Image (spheres, helix red, strand yellow):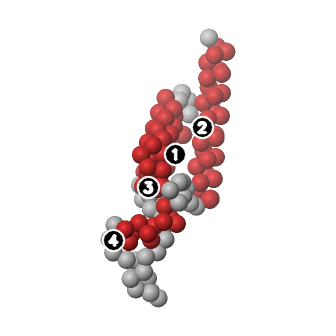
Amino acid sequence: MGFRNFEHQAAELKEKFALRPDTIRLKKGVYLNRHARNNYLEAFAPTCVLGGLAFLGFCYSWLLECCNSGSHREFFTPIVAAFLVSGMFENTFYGSEVLNLVLVFYLCSQVVMTEEVKKVARIS
């Protein structure tokens, strides 16, 4: 299937697994192409177990890095936790403004943590 391919194959999957057709105002009983509306399902559906576990591993390692960060723990940990919780209810990777914000926070967290490691190395 491939990443972001779930949406293109949603109608076929709904028919294959005998799910109830979607209802919309203009047409009744139509299978629509829709995405999963959940980061975790969206990672597991098209990329199977390996892709889903890779996504969970990324989330876990980012959260662990932020929790173990020295002086910036209070800033980055709630942001990562909000991303993880909101991912259960919305697919944040399809909206470019949300995805860009998440990537900016990830970049900032990595830059800050790299500087912390360099600072500790200079002191030691």
Label 3, label 2: how many angstroms apart (C-alpha)?
A: 29 Å
- Residue 87 seen in the current view: no
Is residue 122 toward the left or the right of residue 34 in the image? right
Amino acid type of the residue tagged 1 in the rendering: Ile
Residue at the bottom extreme, as displayed: 26
Residue 38 versus residue 46: which sits nearer the camera?
46
Q: Nearer the viewer, mark 4 or mark 2?
A: 4
Q: Are marks 1 and 2 in contact (CB under 8 Å)?
A: yes
Residue 115 on image: x %, y %: 65, 27
Q: Give me the C-alpha separation between circle 4 and circle 2.
A: 42 Å
Identified by mark 2, the residue type is Ser
Q: Which one is earlier in the sequence, the residue at label 4 or at label 3?
A: 4
Q: Residue at position x 48%, y 50% from top? A: 47
> CA gap, disc 4 to disc 3?
16 Å
In the image, what residue occupies the spot 65% across and 21% down?
119
N-term-proximal mark, 1 vs 2: 1
SS under mark 1 = helix
Q: Which residue is mark 2?
A: 109
Give the mark, 1 or 4, whose residue is nearer the N terminus. Answer: 4
Q: Please determine whether, in this image, residue 39 is positioned above or below residue 54.
A: below
Residue under the image location 59 percent in, 54 percent down: 99
Q: Is residue 28 above or below residue 13?
A: below
Total marks placed: 4
Ranked by sequence position, the earlier of labels 3 and 1 is: 3
Counting other residues with Cα less than 10 Å from the Cα at mark 1, is it few (<14), some (14-19), or many (20 or more)? some
- Kindly identify which residue carries mark 1: 79
Residue annotated with mark 3:
45
Secondary structure, mark 2, is: helix
Question: In the rendering, which numbered label is found on residue 19?
Answer: 4
> In the image, what residue type sits under mark 3?
Ala
Q: Residue furthest front?
A: 16
Q: CA distance from mark 1 to mark 2?
A: 10 Å
